[in-house]
Amino acid sequence: MSRIAPYPLRMSPELREALEDKAEKSKRSLQQEVIYHIDMSLQLEKLLASAPPSSDDTYKRIAKALRLENEVKKKDEKIEELKMQVSLLAESTKNSDTDKFRDIDTQARIAQEALKNIIKNIPLRYEELDERPILVRGTLLNKKAP
């Protein structure tokens, strides 16, 4: 088994602070974070070396890849939203016309009962007017003045 030799690493305080922040967020030690970033940069170099050369520089290619990744994420979110809408639409069409009319009839009966209760609870008002109808408990009466 080979022994891993320690390697002292000097870095600017800003770089160290940035790496410490990233290490804390990813729940790694500072050493693990440094190794992770070195490993990722080596993998990125291999990936870019295997890609066909183009007139764009590496940074533009990376920026384009990130932009495309963001577009894919947005489209995935839109797809999920559309799936939800399709699901809701399918659920709404499960009720047959008969069920819909039954629901409407039930709602109409409830509304009629509510109106009857409102009319029944209107307070009595006696106002004598010249041959004009007056309202008594929600009923119109024609009363002539004496």
Image (tube, rainbow, N blue to C red):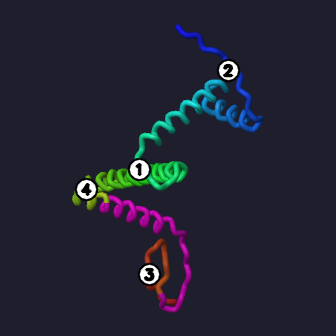
Query: In x, y percent, where is residue 144?
Result: 48, 89
* Vertical comparison of 74 with 28: above or below: below
Which comes before the other along the chain, label 1 or label 3? 1
Q: Which mark is residue 76?
A: 1
Residue behind mark 2: 7
The residue that appears at 51% across and 38% down in the rendered structure is 45
Q: Which mark is residue 99?
A: 4
Q: How many marks?
A: 4
Q: Amino acid at mark 3?
A: Leu
Horizontal side of residue 112 vs 136, given as left or right: left
Q: Marks 1 and 3: which is nearer the front?
A: 1
Measured Cα–Cα span from mark 1 to mark 3: 68 Å
Query: In x, y percent, where is residue 79?
Result: 38, 52
Q: Marks 3 and 2: which is nearer the front?
A: 2
Residue behind mark 3: 141
Q: Which residue is at the front of the view, 68 or 141?
A: 68
Which comes before the other along the chain, label 4 or label 2? 2
Q: Amino acid at mark 2?
A: Tyr
Which comes before the other along the chain, label 4 or label 3? 4
In magenta stretch: residue 84: no
* Vertical comparison of 11 with 117: above or below: above
Which comes before the other along the chain, label 1 or label 4? 1
Write down the quadrant of residue 12 in the picture. Answer: top right
Q: Residue furthest bottom?
A: 130
* Vertical comparison of 34 with 99: above or below: above
Question: Marks 4 and 3: CB-CB under 8 Å?
Answer: no
Query: In x, y percent, where is residue 35?
Result: 60, 27
Q: Which residue is at the front of the view, 135 or 48?
A: 48
Q: Secondary structure at mark 3?
A: strand
The residue that appears at 32% across and 58% down in the rendered structure is 106
Give the magenta part as a residue range: 104-132
